[in-house]
Amino acid sequence: MRVHSAFDRTANLVFEAPVPAWLPLGMVTLACEEVGNLPNGILIRGGAAALRELARVGGRASLEDGHLVLDGGPIDASGAPAWDASLHEVYVRGWRRRWASAWQALARAVGEVPTSPLWGVAARRVDRLAGALERRALGEAIDAATQLVGLGPGLTPSGDDLLVGLLVGMHCGESADGFVSAWGEGVLAASRRTTDVSRVFLEWAARGRTTQRLRDVIEAILGPREEGRLNDALEAALSVGSTSGADGLLGLLIGLRLWTDGSEEDHANAT
């Protein structure tokens, strides 16, 4: 493998050959423990050096006898437990109030001066996409999503983070059907215009796979109520990147609402 990009808390590695067919773009992400699990991630215990010091951009990496060997030294991955990135359908009564609480927390976090284009100049694009998805207007929904792919600065632009959250939210319930799959394919077709890292997360989300931070929010909203669980999950999700956490959470909450039009009783009784 080679090192694609490296930062203090994350580093991205890319398989050169052969590329595993199940791994989008052949990319694996090393992440410090506080980042949380990722669909393509290997978590490093706390106390490790900045990952940019272990994995230098353009450097080599290989897997040897359970060890990930980097320019900056080996990492023992032999005893690492596997993490399931799939979305589990959980329907219980009382989720509407928790959803509203999450929405209010997101609005407070964004504040009066948003730094993400999704809360300012691109807000109409977000509204158009949400409306098209609600009406199940596939062509318009794909076109609206295309207008958001790659929108904003950074390794994962704001528009992509929103689309990841939307795909994840729409895979949580009964709307995860042919329409969601077709829309996801349309998003992936447009994803070539954005960064490699964003493309990887978009493909995982289109498959119904998510990060630990977003799944914790989903389970706090839809799962059995536990004191403090939702606030903790929201705080962790919002801490991701400069705006990535808020942008992804915006998409997730919109996506959850798109399949919650039925009664709570219907969802509570779903298999």
Image (cartoon, rainbow, N blue to C red):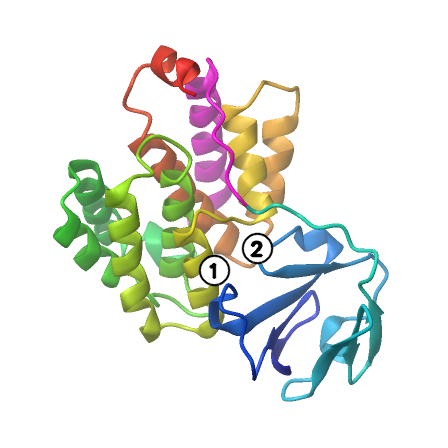
Task: Judge whether residue 112 can be spotted in this image.
Answer: no
Q: Considering depth in this image, is 245 or 71 the residue closer to the camera? A: 71
Answer above or below: position of 149 versus 207.
Answer: below
Percent coordinates x, y for residue 155 in the rendering: 49, 70
Location of residue 30 (image quadrant)? bottom right
Percent coordinates x, y for residue 9 in the rendering: 69, 65
Q: Quadrant of the C terminus?
A: top left
Residue reaching furthest to the top: 265
Tell me, for residue 201, which label it has, or none. 1
- Magenta stretch encompasses residue 116: no
Percent coordinates x, y for residue 100 in the rendering: 42, 25
Q: Considering depth in this image, is 40 or 127 the residue closer to the camera? A: 40
Q: Is residue 145 left or right of residue 110?
A: left
Question: How far is the residue under mark 1 from the one under mark 2?
Answer: 8 Å
Q: Is residue 118 left or right of residue 182?
A: right
- Is label 2 in a helix, a strand or a loop? loop
Tell me, for residue 39, which label it has, or none. 2
Specify the amino acid type for callout 2: Pro
Q: Are marks 1 and 2 in contact (CB under 8 Å)?
A: yes
- Magenta stretch encompasses residue 108: yes
Tell me, for residue 152, which label it has, or none. none
Task: Judge whether residue 203 can be spotted in this image.
Answer: yes
Residue for point 83% across, 65% down: 48
Q: Quadrant of the N terminus?
A: bottom right
Magenta residues span 86-113
Q: Earlier in the sequence, mark 1 or mark 2?
A: 2
Location of residue 116 (image quadrant)? bottom left
Percent coordinates x, y for residue 127 in the rendering: 23, 45
Quick one: label 1, few (<14), some, or many (20+) residues within 10 Å?
A: many
Specify the amino acid type for callout 1: Phe
